[in-house]
Amino acid sequence: MSLIKALIHPVTPFQQNAPILYCEESKKCAFIDPGGDINILLGAAKDNDLIPEKIFLTHGHADHAGAANELAKILSLEIEGPHREDLFLLESLESQGKMFGMQAQNCTPDRWLDDGDEVQLGHETLKVIFCPGHTPGHIVFYHPESKLAAVGDVLFRGSIGRTDLPRGNHQDLLDSITKKLWPLGEEILFISGHGPVSTFGQERKDNAFVADAVLNQS
């Protein structure tokens, strides 16, 4: 069975994880959330003999999507995701970047994604899970066979995404985590937009915001 593997390289002043997911068998790869520092990402793909196939976006914040347009042009790749509700963010990437002192280009994906959609990577199929809250159009990419999820800024090791940014919603975020992610299984390894990897089971044990004990769930 072919599996999806990940290389994780932090980019931008925000140290945003920009995972490169690749199909072990075909060596085809997808750049997830290329916020900047394209040279780092291109170098990593080349060093590992990967064949760039797609760009996937979890949401429209500049540290995640700021270099997607540039990378798509350099490699002639299509951009898939996020959900259409993040259009207003993708249309303001340049101004977001200026606010934070980083380069960013507005972008329009070739394909908007919705809950239940699927995306192809090499020989493998990833599932799309709509997880609003941090942004209204945030999505997660999930590969059941590899027990791996790229969750953007929905969930972190010990924390959760901010909801005080435009159109963030705290209750929506909690619902996304507990109703969409937890049912996938405690053993699922997830790559967040910032910080170390963890598992859903670990977060259910001791995450200060969404642990079962905190939310009074059994």
Image (cartoon, helix red, strand yellow):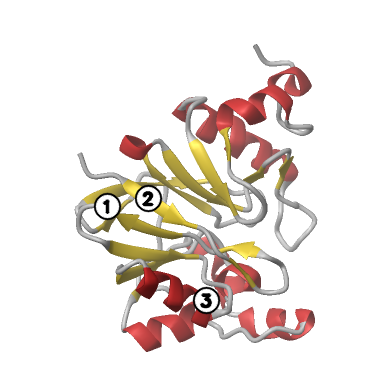
Question: Where, by quadrant of the figure, is residue 26 drawn?
Answer: bottom left
Q: Is residue 15 above or below residue 192?
A: below
Residue that carries the numbered disc 1 in the rendered image: 24
Q: Amino acid at mark 3?
A: Ile
Question: Where, by quadrant of the figure, is residue 137 drawn?
Answer: bottom right
Residue 40 - label: 3
Q: Amino acid at mark 2?
A: Lys
Q: Is residue 86 above or below residue 73?
A: above
- Position of the N terminus, as image quadrant, is top left
**Mark 3 to mark 1 CA distance (whole Å):** 21 Å
Tell me if residue 213 can be seen: yes
Q: Is residue 53 above or below residue 210?
A: below
Residue that carries the numbered disc 2 in the rendered image: 5
3 or 2: tag closer to the N-terminus? 2
Q: Are marks 1 and 2 in contact (CB under 8 Å)?
A: yes
Q: From this viewpoint, which residue is outermost toward the top?
A: 218
- Position of the C terminus, as image quadrant, is top right
Q: Which residue is painted at 73% across and 31% down in the image?
A: 207
Residue count near mark 1 (Cα–Cα under 10 Å), binned few <14, some 14–19, many ≥20: some
Q: Secondary structure at mark 1?
A: loop
Asked if residue 180 lies left or right of residue 207, the reply is left
Q: Position of residue 125 (x, y in %)?
A: 27, 49
Q: Which residue is painted at 52% across and 66% down in the image?
A: 33
